Image (cartoon, rainbow, N blue to C red):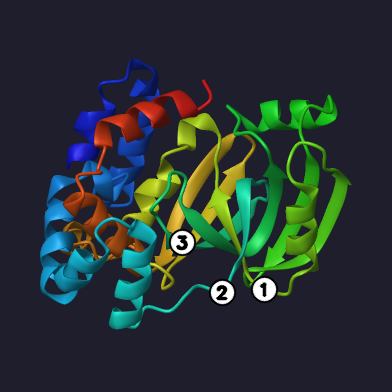
Amino acid sequence: MDSLKLLSKYDNLTKILELTKEYASKLSLVFAIHAYFENEIISNVVKSLESKVKNIYEDYKFDRTLFVKNASKTLGIKEDDFAYYPYYAIPISKETKVKFIDNSTIPPKALIMKGVVRFTFMAYRSFQELEDHVASREEEDIVIEFENGKIKSHNRKRNIFTDANVVSKIISSNKEVLLNLTLPSSYYLIPSLVSMNVLPYENEVLVIREGESLDFRIINGKVSGDRVVMGDTLHPRFKLELYYDYKFKRILKEEIAEGLAYKIPL
């Protein structure tokens, strides 16, 4: 797959990619980090949608939002009804059960089916670095316990770096909460790897923590390599975004890869 070749250009990602490759082998996963890195996935998704949405694209080719909205309506794709935390969510419990929803971003978006996370403004190299920043008041101190995607309990001691109104709305909401599932640097790409190998909505993945070490178990939702290449693990709305960006020549994989390389804390 193309993800490894593309990301291997960045020396600062060498160790991260090595660990990611180890888990790809251990879990028998296709090494794909993002659909825009993978020419074969792009080609297959575009082919699968061409006859269904090409006329809609012609009508809305200069407005991506309107294209996705109208194509979604035509294809019967429903809007997700989640609350959304737009910063980082770092799982800190010994076991965290997650459900991946949308891998259009890195890190991917997921629901926490059971476990405890910290809401943070930044990503970190390690759990210890995170706790040090919390202790020195350089980071939020917001701990959330989830069950079935919803907040079960929360401890909000400090909220000064992220939008307090957003946090308040999420805490008071009874909706499932969609999060950017973020892990320490060495493991940063693994949520993306796993999410590219499981069906959106229809998966269950266990993140197991022992100190600074993490392990992963896919309980259900894993698909064959052929289905990954066909784009079956992409969120339906993301497929439409991909189609539009391909047609409009906006799949800027080099720029995305470079941004990712400098985004991961080292």
Q: Which residue is mark 2?
A: 81
Relative height, residue 185 to residue 91 (above, below): above
* Label 1 neighbour load within 10 Å: few <14, some 14-19, many 20+: some
Which label was assigned to residue 11?
none
Q: Position of residue 161 (x, y in %)?
A: 76, 36
- Under circle 1, the secondary element is loop
Q: Earlier in the sequence, mark 2 or mark 3?
A: 2
Q: Position of residue 86 (x, y in %)?
A: 60, 50
Q: Earlier in the sequence, mark 1 or mark 3?
A: 3
Cα–Cα gap, marks 2 and 3: 15 Å
Residue type of the residue flagged with mark 3? Phe
Cα–Cα gap, marks 1 and 2: 8 Å
Q: Which residue is mark 3?
A: 100
Q: Earlier in the sequence, mark 1 or mark 2?
A: 2
Q: Position of residue 170 (x, y in %)?
A: 73, 62
Q: Judge by depth and name the residue closer to the eye, 60 or 126.
A: 60
In the rendered image, the quadrant that contains the N terminus is top left
Q: Within the image, what quadrant is residue 230 found in?
A: bottom left
Cα–Cα gap, marks 1 and 3: 16 Å
Q: Could you tell whether 61 is left or right of 236 in the image?
A: left
Name of the residue lying farthest toward the top? 11
Q: Position of residue 255 (x, y in %)?
A: 31, 30
Q: Which residue is mark 1?
A: 175
* Label 3 neighbour load within 10 Å: few <14, some 14-19, many 20+: many
